[in-house]
Image (cartoon, grey):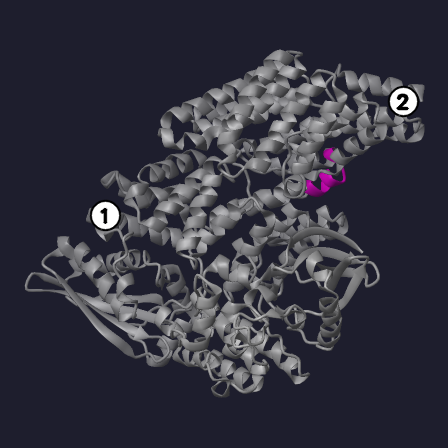
Amino acid sequence: MKSSRSSGGGGWARVYRAHDTKLNEEVALKLIKPEIAADERTVERFHNEIKIARKISHKNVCRTHDLHEEGRTLYLTMEYVRGEDLKSLIKRTHALTVGTALAIARQMAEGLAEAHKLGIVHRDLKPGNVMIDKEGQAKIMDFGVARALREKGITGAGAIVGTLEYMSPEQVEGKPADARADIYSLGIILFEMLTGRVPFDGETAFAIANKQKSEPPPAPRKLVPQIPEGLNKLILRCLEKDREKRYQTDAELIADLAMVEEALPTAERLAPKLKTITRREITVKFQPRKLVIPTVAVLVLAVAGFFLWRNVIHRPTPPLPAVKPTLAFLAIRNSSGDASLDVWKDNLPTLLGGGLAQSRYLRVLDDFQVYGALKKLNLLNADKYTPDELKNIAAVGGATHLLSGNYLSAGGKFIVYLSLIDAKTGAVINPIQEEAPDEEAIYESVDKLVKKVKTALNIPEQNIDESTYKMVGDYYTRNPKAFQYYIEGEKAHQAQDPTKAISAFEKAIELDPGFAMAYRMLGINAGNIRDFVKKYRYLGKAYELRDKLPEKERLLAEGSWYMLREGTHPKAYAAFKKVVERYPDDYQGRSLMAFVAEDSDERIREYEYLLHAQNQNKSVLLYDNLTAAYCARGDFRKARETYEESLKSLPPDPWRHILLSNVFQLEKNLDAALKEYEKAVALAPNDPWVKAMIINIDLTKEDQDRALKTLKNILKTQKDHTIFDDIFAIIFMIKGKFKESLDLDEKAEKKALSERWPNAALNKMLTFSGKEFLQTGQAEKALEKFRAGLEYVKKEEDKLPEKDFDNLIHERRVSLIWQVCALCDLGRVEEAAILQRELESLIPKYIKEGRKVCYCMNTALSAGRIALAKKDAAAAANTLEYSLQVMSGEFATRTSDHAYLLDLLGDAYQMGARLEKAAEAYARIRELQGGRADWGAVYAKSYYKLGKVLDQMGKKAEAREKYSKFLDLWKDADPGLPEVEDARKRIAAL
């Protein structure tokens, strides 16, 4: 039995994930606490209860394997479930949707039914004993454990078995428990899933026990009005104090659960197979110098990142299902006969939507979603809708309520009439009216209408006037013409015409320079057309004006700005996480939080959750980001399966085949990769970027000559040859043609300066150039580039308020790290040590932002480089090994600097005569697909260095092979490179 990764397992055990060598499968190993294992009677009870529990065989019950004793150590083995426990899920989401809660409760009831049929009662059913696996299946754990661990009861009259917050009244009183006690506990769990709290709580065990025995539970519908009445009654029946009044059988409960579920709107029900309920955009650092990186692993991520900017922020997306009311706007018509008032047909829904969308207690579908629903039902040109048509519109869009209306001008007043429609029945729930003395006062009237709509939706009175509400006139603009341009831009944005959208939004800010939301939309659409100068400028302006935005939009603007400046900045994560905490059903906030999350498991959980929540409206974005997250974790099989699923679910798209091709390359299946590439070209035969992607396969095969030939052939049909300069530069570095690569760098820098790129973008470009100089032996020029980049960082710092200065610590840190490395190459070790101390001084401040792992990784890299320069092989190896350790997992796949680190580590091992380890380090560089982007020369020279080590080890044939491969890579290299001459001499000597 091999075990790893311990975690908490309740109060009686520690839980480990282990591999059972006899079963040849992963298991959960629960190591029972010594004080419990020392009690012979408890051990005997465990044996007896486990024998009974093993009789249960059901998909919703976690299988129990056996109880083992090793000396004084007692441990239980059971089925290992990949996912999270229900308690964690409730804590993370605060409350589950009605559909999700019902699906989980039904599965639990079915698992209990199987146990109860065998006469087995759980007695300690609680969210912590329920796992939700990767397929969304609920699995009940720990049958029999409660009885095995029974203790004296608080009443002294008997034995209490269970957890007080979930315990039936009869258990509290120490009476025997039967199946109805488990039904009571299930009722409490269902109550908690829907409301986020348990019905009975208190500061002491006595207080909780007393409430369980004598206090009636609060009606869950009073806490969450959106809970259906049928479900409210079902929960209260489960929680009857007198067990004779509860559900008497599981079958009866399951039948009622099914009836409640059936009564839900289609959009709120969960699919029969619950796709993972368990939970960055994959981080692609902004590098204008390298918009496309022709190396497999990096390209997968880069393209996924591009899709995110194209889809997450820039394309409206379907919402998550939730218990809160979901509102869709239909037409608001001009009934005045005055064509001059037609502008309000668009303005009113936008203003109302902006006001209502600020609420945490309802959801508003955007125009794109409503348009899609109407188009699908062939109702785009309809003026009126039948009740059945209204139901269909709601079902397709996922709405619980519809809002339509009209307006007119009478007696100088502007009057708005709205109809709130129940999506289930198609009937008008409530007519709503508001009037303004003139057009200028319409903004205030909209704010009043927002309150009336909330009231009509039965939102509790205390939740109607939210402190974070921004008046719509302040949120948007009071300049009518600017507002018209804004709506024109929104329509173009929804039609995915970013050029037209930018033109309209720019006209809006000309008329109102303080229009924060227009700047945000400008930055988004500039990113869509890769105009990074405008993207920086406009998102920066939106950040500057963020206090004019409502809370959710302000947080999104802040997070987007931080993300733009540094892809995984902790401030970006904090901003997006706050959106999710306050607006848990906000698709955009949750997507962006996942994109910048440091933990790859969190990203995968969030994207899987979102993909499930999309139901029938699965998006390109989610598939791309989930796949990229799997790639970042190194799980290429899951990445491939996700892309294959997306090809079945989504319209044909050449880039989906390109990305799948890249994953096949990561799996070393080049034949399958080539087939996917051919499918992509068939879909887009005239797209130069699609054609160019075959170079990924060429580079995986280490055929740089063929890759160059492919690019040159494509350029014969292209007017702008600069679009592929980045790819040429990287291939030239691999081939040892440094002059050509560096000439392209210089050309790109001049172009960026002439186009007045932002300071942060220029710093990243200079950092890339510095790395190229560093690996070509031109450390003085590398140092010059790194220092010049730092000056641009300082210029950017001068623009920011003092409170936001920390945003650039990462950029300053990166510059210092590479300056240390360059100084060490120059032999100026003392200067490097001074910079290292400055770098170390930044750590405490940065750790507070939650980036300790990444920070230590880079600090260790530069510290290891100093130790290497001082000829301290042992210290260098230890420090660089630590850097490699914290760089493992997601970083190992994603970061191109991994190649440089392994190169230094190989040098340290060789210096310390640890030749086997040196050979291993150099060999690993060749396995890093992504390592060829920034470190092409390091990648090529890894063959040369590996040959030298093998030669020292006496492995002559292997050494000759590596030298030959290196010389083949550098057959057209710049003349006079010392490695080439040395490799030739060594081959001759062999």
Residue at 65 percent across and 72 percent down: it is 147
Amino acid tagged 2:
Ile
Residue 643 visible in rendering:
yes
Secondary structure beneath label 2? helix
Q: In which quarter of the image is residue 42?
A: bottom right
- Residues under numbered marks 2 and 1 in contact, where contact means CB atoms less than 8 Å apart: no
Badge number at residue 987? 2
Mark identifier at residue 474: 1
Q: Nearer the viewer, residue 448 or 854?
A: 854
Residue at x 46%, y 63% (from the top left corner): 204
Query: Of callouts 2 and 1, which one flags the residue occurring earlier in the amino acid sequence?
Result: 1
Residue 237 location, x and y as percent? Answer: 45, 82
Report the span colored magenta.
695-704
Say which element carries label 1. Answer: helix
Instruction: Report the front residue among 658 and 328.
Output: 328
Measuring from the top left, give residue 438's x and y in whole percent.
Answer: 10, 57
Q: Which amino acid does label 1 sit on?
A: Asp
Residue found at x 38% / y 77%: 391
